[in-house]
Amino acid sequence: MSQTYTYPYPVQSPPKKYYQAEKELQDLQQEKEELIQKFELELPNDSTRINYLDQAEYLGQVKDQDIKHGIGRYKYPNGDIYIGEWKNDKFHGDGKYIFSFGERYEGELVGGRKHGYGKYFYANGNIYDGSWYNDLKDGQGTYIYKTTGEKYIGLWRMGERQGYGTYYYCHGDIYVGLWENGYKSGQGVLTFASGAKYEGMWARDKANGRGIMVYSNDDKFDGDWYDGAKCGKGVYYYADGSKYDGEWADDDKNGIGLFQYSNGDYYQGQFQDGEQSGKGVYYYINGDRYEGDWRNDKREGHGIIWMENGDKYTGEWLDGDKNGEGVYEFASGDIYEGYWESGQRSGQGIYRWVNGDIYSGEWKADKMHGKGVFTTADGTKYEKYFENDAIVDK
């Protein structure tokens, strides 16, 4: 008797890498032959052999002469083999389907599809062991990656990781939490092999939403995340006792924030790319206070500093020091108005003493140096040359 038969699985063209594993295919062929021999020895007495026009062959139980029903073995023209239970011409019950290119399924089937509990062995060595629904992984299951040693244990839905599950990474990281469409999504905890740990919300395999990261050096961030990076509002606690509370973007301090240093100093103002940049106020533990421009964590631009001893400077800054034009008002009442370089009076400047004396001229390294005019409180003027605050003859 001959007839055609529609494959329950599409004929697949095996990737080239499968053909390269000649030894594995030879082992598979031997396994198939041993399985067939064992099956044929245990064949029911009422078995029937059917040969089909397309060179397929069935050996097993039938009903109504040619409907596969009961226990049987089916050989496909492409080399695939199914051995197991049948119902009304379809796989139904326990069975094994072995593909010619190295993959196989062992488990329950319903209506010609993987359904219930079963194991799938992939040609690359990966294994899925768990529940199936309508030919797709669905329910509780374990997927093991042979080449990397990674493993997922958890829930599946329509062939994808979905629901609660645990993923063991090859480098030692472990994720425990929710999944959606194969991605970490929802609440979850990722513990790193380094000792760091992230606990919070996920979307498409990356931290998204509110989450807490504890780093291996004991630093800690509690705040908003976007696409795996700190973004939004958040507090960063440093292991040395420092703390930043403010805005974030691109995984760094960006926007307005408050940085409290472990020594008691604190800065409130603008940040850019992790550094104090823009407008801000810095409060020193010794009582000094600076308010003005910043760049790359240093005072730069225009700013005012009020010192604990009563002194005050208003003017230009560069690389953290007074630099350019500025006015320094001493607590004593003296005033210097002029140019600065690297934190010292340098260039043209005027110094007014509280007693009424005035010096107008050149300065160097915080001292009168060069040509200048000294005017006493009674109006007497002396035009002299100075070196290191001393008058010299020229």
Image (cartoon, rainbow, N blue to C red):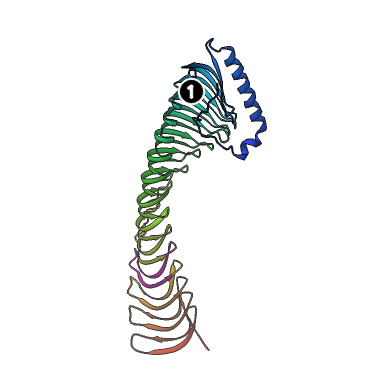
191 sits left or right of 12 in the view? left
Q: Residue at x 48, y 23 (%)?
A: 107
Q: Residue at x 42, y 52 (%)?
A: 251
Q: Is residue 315 or residue 251 the one in the foreground?
A: 251
Q: Residue at x 59, y 39 (%)?
A: 15
Q: Is residue 198 visible?
A: no
Q: Is residue 218 or residue 18 the one in the foreground?
A: 18
> Would you name the residue on which mark 1 appears?
107
Answer few, some or many: residues within 10 Å of disc 1's Cα (few below 14, many 20 plus, some between 14 and 19).
many
Q: Is residue 16 above or below residue 375?
A: above
Q: Is residue 359 above or below residue 58?
A: below
Q: Is residue 152 visible?
A: yes
272 sits left or right of 20 in the view? left
Disc 1 element: strand
**For residue 301: magenta?**
yes
Q: What span is colored magenta in the figure?
A: 295-317
Q: Quadrant of residue 325?
A: bottom left
Q: Residue at x 43, y 35 (%)?
A: 161
